[in-house]
Image (cartoon, helix red, strand yellow):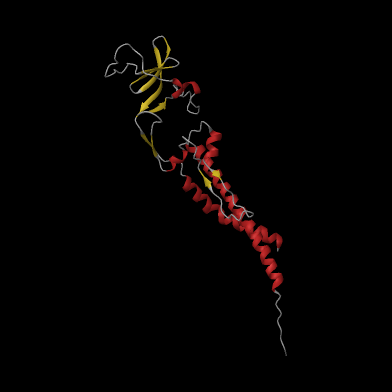
Amino acid sequence: MNIEVSIDAAKALLRLRRGANRMGYAAVTAINKTVLAVQAAERERAARVFTLRKSDFILRQVAIVRPFASVAAGRFEARVSVGQKPRLLLGQYETGFTRQPFKGKNVAVPVLGGARPTREAAVPAELRFTALQLRRPVTGRRAPRKAGPGTPLRRGLLRTFMVPGAVLQRVGRGATRVLYVLARPFRVAPRLEFYRTARRVIARDFARNLKRQIDETFGRHA
């Protein structure tokens, strides 16, 4: 008795190629769903731990997805990062940093109820430190070597003036309010937790997303 086995690999190879293509789409979909979940989690944390005065801008910058995974581009990875625009300190909140002045020796910290109307509000454009144009007084005699606590060191627009440690504004006869406190560079604590949040979401979602996409893809085309 002769027993013959005939194997035709053509159909199997064709199915494998199609399967590999579908597998690629399943993987890319799982990657992109996971990275969007990371983006949402990063934004949720930022909204919770920071006082957002330009919320739309900050929430865009706290988690930028670029690029997404793409089968057409042969890219089976996606990246999410914190924006790096000039003077944007957001990324430095990951490890903490020393707040340095943009100019001079002191950091101008806006006072609540002074330059900053409310905790959630931005400093009005006309009360921004640089907009006040604080300049040394021009006098016909030499300024004293040591200024007293009430001696104006500089004068600016909107009836503002600088004394040691603060910038004030005259708001009425004999009345002033503090706009800024002038502080030495100070340490800002880490609060962003970008990496911790991303790792938590990836560990929670990626394997589950990939399994779901594979099940849906191959189940539908089995």
Residue 41 seen by the camera: yes
Residue 191 in view (yes/no): no
Could you tell me which residue is drawn at 69 percent across and 66 percent down? 15
Q: Residue furthest left?
A: 145
Q: Position of residue 221 (x, y in %)?
A: 71, 61
Which quadrant of the figure contains the C terminus?
bottom right
Q: Position of residue 13 (x, y in %)?
A: 68, 69
Residue 186: name its quadrant.
top left
Q: Residue at x 54, y 35 (%)?
A: 57
Q: Position of residue 24 (x, y in %)?
A: 63, 58
Question: Which image quadrant is residue 144 in?
Answer: top left
Q: Is residue 19 left or right of residue 203?
A: right
Percent of width and height locating residue 21: 66, 60
Relative to the observer, which residue lies in front, 108 or 202?
Answer: 108
- Compared across the picture, whether 146 is left or right of 28 comes to left
Q: Is 146 or 196 nearer to us in this picture?
A: 146
Closer-to-camera residue (43/143): 143
For the residue pair 162 and 218, the one nearer the viewer reads as 162
State the residue lying farthest toward the right.
Answer: 1
- Horizontal placement of 26 versus 173: left or right? right
Of all residues, the one furthest to the bottom in this rendering is: 1
Name the residue at 67% across, 57% down. 216
Query: Which residue is depicted at the point 50% across and 23% down?
Result: 125
On screen, residue 221 versus residue 148, left or right, reads right
**Extreme residue toward the top, this view:** 173
Label total for image: 0
Q: Quadrant of the N terminus?
A: bottom right
Vertical arrangement, residue 149 with respect to residue 196, above or below: above
